[in-house]
Image: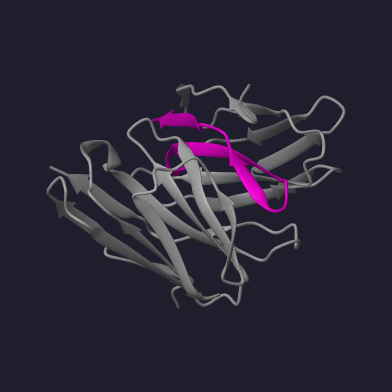
């Protein structure tokens, strides 16, 4: 049973295009996250939603727009893709205030050409 | 100053060796602490949570020193399959998780 799933797993696209990545969790968690892991392997938080409400919004270009239709889903839409957007994007979920760990999706490897 | 600092390594050790990783964190109000493991081209996965009293899981021992804001991970009797990147993670600020940059471990036959 997949706990946190993401689609697509790989995404190759041209500069200037708009693309979306989807994430779903079946753990019953109330908080979901998007992270970016670049070529230097550093995991950087981008956004976090708790019960569909945005609670963390790091310094990310406004070309990136997250959307949470319900607490089990968190999507990421990226407009006008740039070369520097190439990275692995991980979705994660956790239960807020539980002190428990995050669970990660398998990642979406985005390559912008 | 980074929220979580780790030695990036790599640590190159022979099978059977004991290896220790350290991590320091800057926010004294941090509440939860974890070690994650990340294999190449895979997602991070929880290795173990770190408790104030220290905890052990088989060959792995984690320690927390709140006074020094320091977390450690000890791996005994290293296996080839332990080769991975180990991420120190600290939870603070309304469920914001801070990740270290990871320590790479290579276990050689």
| Residue B59 placement, left or right of A24 | right
Does residue B98 appear in this view? yes
Q: Name the residue located 24 percent from the left edge and 59 percent from the top edge.
A: A19
Position of residue B87 measured from the top left corner of the image (x, y, whole percent)? 55, 38
Q: Quadrant of the N terminus of chain B?
A: top right
| Residue B59 placement, left or right of B79 | right
Position of residue B100 measured from the top left corner of the image (x, y, whole percent)? 57, 33
Position of residue B27 measured from the top left corner of the image (x, y, whole percent)? 75, 33
Q: Quadrant of residue B12?
A: top left
| Residue B3 placement, left or right of A12 | right
Near-viewer residue (B25 or A67): A67
| Secondary structure character of the magenta stretch overall | strand
Near-viewer residue (B5 or B27): B27
Position of residue B108 measured from the top left corner of the image (x, y, whole percent)? 40, 29
Q: Is residue B46 magenta?
A: no
**Span shown in magenta:** B80-109
Does residue A9 appear in this view? no
Asked if A61 appears above or below A104 in the picture, the reply is above
- Judged from this view, the residue extending furthest toward the front is A62
* Color theme of the render: one colour
Q: Is residue B105 magenta?
A: yes
Q: Name the residue located 53 percent from the left edge and 35 percent from the top edge.
A: B78
Q: How many marks?
A: 0
């Amino acid at each position: 049973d997949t706990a946190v799933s993401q689609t697509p797993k790989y995404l190759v696209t041209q500069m200037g295009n708009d693309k979306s990545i989807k994430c779903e969790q079946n753990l019953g968690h109330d908080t979901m996250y998007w992270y970016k892991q670049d070529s230097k392997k550093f995991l950087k938080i981008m956004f976090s939603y708790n019960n569909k409400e945005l609670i963390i919004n790091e310094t990310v270009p406004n070309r990136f727009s997250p959307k949470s239709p319900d607490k089990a889903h968190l999507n990421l839409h990226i407009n006008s893709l740039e070369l520097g957007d190439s990275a692995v994007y991980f979705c994660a979920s956790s239960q807020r205030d539980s002190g428990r760990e995050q669970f990660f999706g398998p990642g979406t490897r985005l390559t912008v050409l | 100053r980074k929220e979580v600092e780790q030695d990036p390594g790599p640590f190159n050790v022979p099978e059977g060796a004991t290896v220790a990783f350290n991590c320091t964190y800057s926010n004294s109000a941090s509440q939860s602490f974890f070690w994650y493991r990340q294999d190449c081209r895979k997602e991070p996965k929880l290795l173990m949570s770190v408790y104030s009293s220290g905890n052990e899981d088989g060959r792995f021992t984690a320690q927390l020193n709140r006074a020094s804001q320091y977390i450690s991970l000890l791996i005994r009797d290293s296996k080839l399959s332990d080769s991975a990147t180990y991420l120190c993670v600290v939870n603070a600020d309304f469920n914001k998780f801070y990740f270290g940059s990871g320590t790479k471990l290579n276990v050689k036959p």
